Image (cartoon, rainbow, N blue to C red):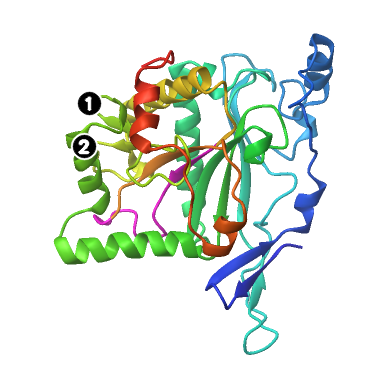
């Protein structure tokens, strides 16, 4: 069973999830699949239509007009190899003054973003991406109903270098019974800024980026995409709401569609101009209880995996970025991707 153990030297919890080592893994980086192998992949892929019996019991689905169980557009299932389990208890069972541990309570869900095995998110229509965002929002709202869960991570891994183990495009949602240290630090920084100035750090940052313009990749009436001034990795890109006041779980459908349009444009730029890089994508959300607070602004972060952290990063905790954010934004603005 999974469990969490507290690292006294960092002030953070570590998830121990033995089932994760059983995940299937594939390596297609050096051997592009043939038409025959792709067909064989779809026949055994647990996320492809017709293979619904290969996944745990369905949690939610957006279906078409037909009655077939395989007639779905977005599908949500429990992760077969979960990091945390909803059946577990968060009960503490410490083994000594410094050896703190608790049950591996949480939720780990997979959101299959479309029935199409080979179509990546950058190639999907705005309608389909909107359905995915609406599904993520719905599942987030539902998981918030379990008071055991204190933080929620909505994320997508794209490519082997980003940690994906199955080719069929999908997102994941993990709810945890504790607030991870990185999230605590980020929100402490935002809270301190708000207490000192009365302003939301992220709204001020957005205004400064738009005023400067050097790192802006794209913008619309509702959202702006930019490479942050202190980006940790090459081509790291944020998508931030410009005028929205609602937390993510209350964002209206029209604004989710505007977000889908912006996300599609940015991903197409990365897909075209950086040759479909591996990347991680996450929706940054506040901890439980702070959803309506003014100090934080939810946003998306896209982190291409174009470099590998090495000894300095491990030893110091600092990042080394080989591409200036201004150069990255200029490259994406002038590239071949959709705007």
From the viewer's perspective, is residue 56 above or below residue 175?
above
Quarter of the figure that contains the N terminus: bottom right
User: Residue at image x 71%, y 21%?
Assistant: 49
Depth check, front residue: 249 or 98 = 98
**264 vs 166: above or below:** above
- Residue stretch rendered in magenta on the structure: 280-295
Please report whichever mark, 2 or 1, sits nearer to the chain's N-terminal start: 1
Using the rendered image of the protein, determine whether residue 73 is visible from the camera's viewpoint: yes
Q: Is residue 179 visible?
A: no
In the picture of the structure, the residue carrying the numbered disc 2 is 243
Q: Please, is residue 25 above or below residue 204 in the view?
A: above
Distance, label 2 to label 1, CA atoms, is 8 Å
Q: Residue at x 22, y 26 (%)?
A: 221
Give x and y (percent) for residue 153: 51, 49
Residue 247 at x, y percent in the picture: 32, 46
Residue 184, x across and y down, in percent: 42, 64
What secondary structure predominates along the stretch shown in magenta?
Answer: loop
Secondary-structure class at tag 1: loop
Q: Could you classify mark 1 by the number of other residues whose Cα lies within 10 Å: few (under 14), some (14-19), or many (20 or more)?
A: few
Q: Nearer the viewer, residue 179 or 201?
A: 201
The residue to which callout 1 is attached is 221
Farthest residue in the top direction?
35
Query: Is residue 166 inside the magenta stretch?
Result: no
Q: Quadrant of residue 114?
A: top right
Quadrant assignment for the C terminus: top left
Answer whether residue 286 is magenta in the image: yes
User: Mark 2 falls on what kind of element?
Assistant: loop
Of all residues shown, which one is farthest toward the bottom? 97
Which residue is rendered at x = 74% and y = 48% of the image? Answer: 81
Which one is in front, 53 or 323? Answer: 323
């Amino acid at each position: 069973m999974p469990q969490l153990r507290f690292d006294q030297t960092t002030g953070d919890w570590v998830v121990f999830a033995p089932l994760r080592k059983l995940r299937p893994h594939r390596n297609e980086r050096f051997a592009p699949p043939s038409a025959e192998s792709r067909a064989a992949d779809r026949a055994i892929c647990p996320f492809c239509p017709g293979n619904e019996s290969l996944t745990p019991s369905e949690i939610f689905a957006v279906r078409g007009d037909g009655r077939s169980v395989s007639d779905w557009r977005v599908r949500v299932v429990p992760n077969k190899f979960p990091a945390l389990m909803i059946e577990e208890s968060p009960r503490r069972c410490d083994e000594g003054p410094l050896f703190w541990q608790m049950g591996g309570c949480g939720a780990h869900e997979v959101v299959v973003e479309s029935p199409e095995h080979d179509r990546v998110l950058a190639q999907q229509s705005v309608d389909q991406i909107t359905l995915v965002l609406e599904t993520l929002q719905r599942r987030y709202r539902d998981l918030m109903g379990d008071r055991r869960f204190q933080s929620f991570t909505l994320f997508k891994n794209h490519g082997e270098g980003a940690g994906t183990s199955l080719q069929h495009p999908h997102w994941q949602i993990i709810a945890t019974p504790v607030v991870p240290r990185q999230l605590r630090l980020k929100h402490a920084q935002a809270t301190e800024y708000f207490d000192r100035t009365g302003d939301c750090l992220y709204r001020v940052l957005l205004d400064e980026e738009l005023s400067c313009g050097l790192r802006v990749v794209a913008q619309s009436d509702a959202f702006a995409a930019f490479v942050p001034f202190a980006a940790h990795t090459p081509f790291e890109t944020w998508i931030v709401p410009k005028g929205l006041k609602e937390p993510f779980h209350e964002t209206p459908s029209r604004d989710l569609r505007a977000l889908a349009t912006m996300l599609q444009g940015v991903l197409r730029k990365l897909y075209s101009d950086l040759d479909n890089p591996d990347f991680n994508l996450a929706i940054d959300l506040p901890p439980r209880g702070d959803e309506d607070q003014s100090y934080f602004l939810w946003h998306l972060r896209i982190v291409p995996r174009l470099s590998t952290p090495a000894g300095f990063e491990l030893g110091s905790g600092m990042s080394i970025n080989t591409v200036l954010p201004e150069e990255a934004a200029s490259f994406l603005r002038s590239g071949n991707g959709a705007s």
